[in-house]
Image: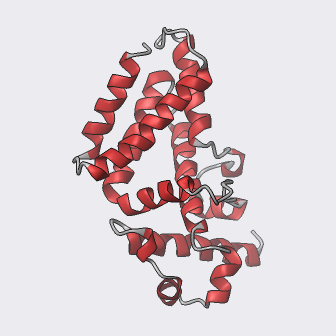
Amino acid sequence: MNVRKEKAAKLKVHILDQTLKAVGVKSFSDLYVDELCKKVKISKVTFFKYFPQKEDLLLYYFRIWCLHRSVELKQKPKEGLQGIYYFFEKMAEEMETRPGVLLSLIAYLADMGRSIKPFPVKPEEKKLLYPDEPNINAIEIQSIEQLLERFILEAILKKEITKTTATRDIANLITANLWGCILICHTAQLAPPKIFFKRYLDWTLNGIC
């Protein structure tokens, strides 16, 4: 691995790690770049070199989260409804441990003035996060929409979903359910999240299966 690229990968992953430790159950808006730079021991110039906006950390966090799911699914494949339930369970776990980050991500995505695009994860960062995973760079990072569409198509082929509806429409319905669960768990103070995420998914799937 190129030494310069390896150093950059370590720094980006370290910044993200410190961000997640600093935010946790707090709001991302309460995190200040000056404070984060002190923890990581870098200058603001260096920080903005890798993250032109503070909010880019949210996109990077979520891209890495999707990488973790993609690797897990390679190691322990899941199909159809099993995959959908797996995805909701993982998001519920994230809601329990990092509600501040997830809620801030939703606020960011909902901002009409922003142009949303995936934050890049470089090969060196993948290797750093998964040093023991052979061919880690061959694993494609799939988005929520891509993963859900795949699971839904599998569920239709396995006749787990029986209603005649477009795959894209079902994916949109389940994605809306997913983001809605995060907001409802927060606003209604529902705990533990896993119970409610599963319950709402059960009700949604009952309508299409």
In front of the other: 168 or 41? 168
Q: Quadrant of the C terminus?
A: top left
Q: How many marks?
A: 0
> Measuring 54% from the left and 53% from the top, which residue is drawn there?
110
Residue 98 seen from this side = no
In the displayed structure, 207 sits above or below 27; it is above
In the displayed structure, 82 sits above or below 67; it is above
In the displayed structure, 87 sits above or below 63; it is above
In the rendered structure, the answer to whether residue 43 lies left or right of residue 199 reads: right
Name the residue at the front extreme. Answer: 112
In the rendered structure, the answer to whether residue 49 lies left or right of residue 68 reads: right
Name the residue at the right extreme. Answer: 2
Where residue 195 sits, quadrant-wise, is top left
- The x and y percentages for residue 125 are 65, 63
In front of the other: 192 or 109? 109
Q: Quadrant of the N terminus?
A: bottom right
- The x and y percentages for residue 169 are 57, 24
- The x and y percentages for residue 153 are 59, 20
- The x and y percentages for residue 36 are 49, 83
In front of the other: 60 or 30? 30
In the displayed structure, 198 sits above or below 133; it is above
> Measuring 56% from the left and 45% from the top, which residue is drawn there?
71
> Measuring 38% from the left and 63% from the top, which residue is drawn there?
100
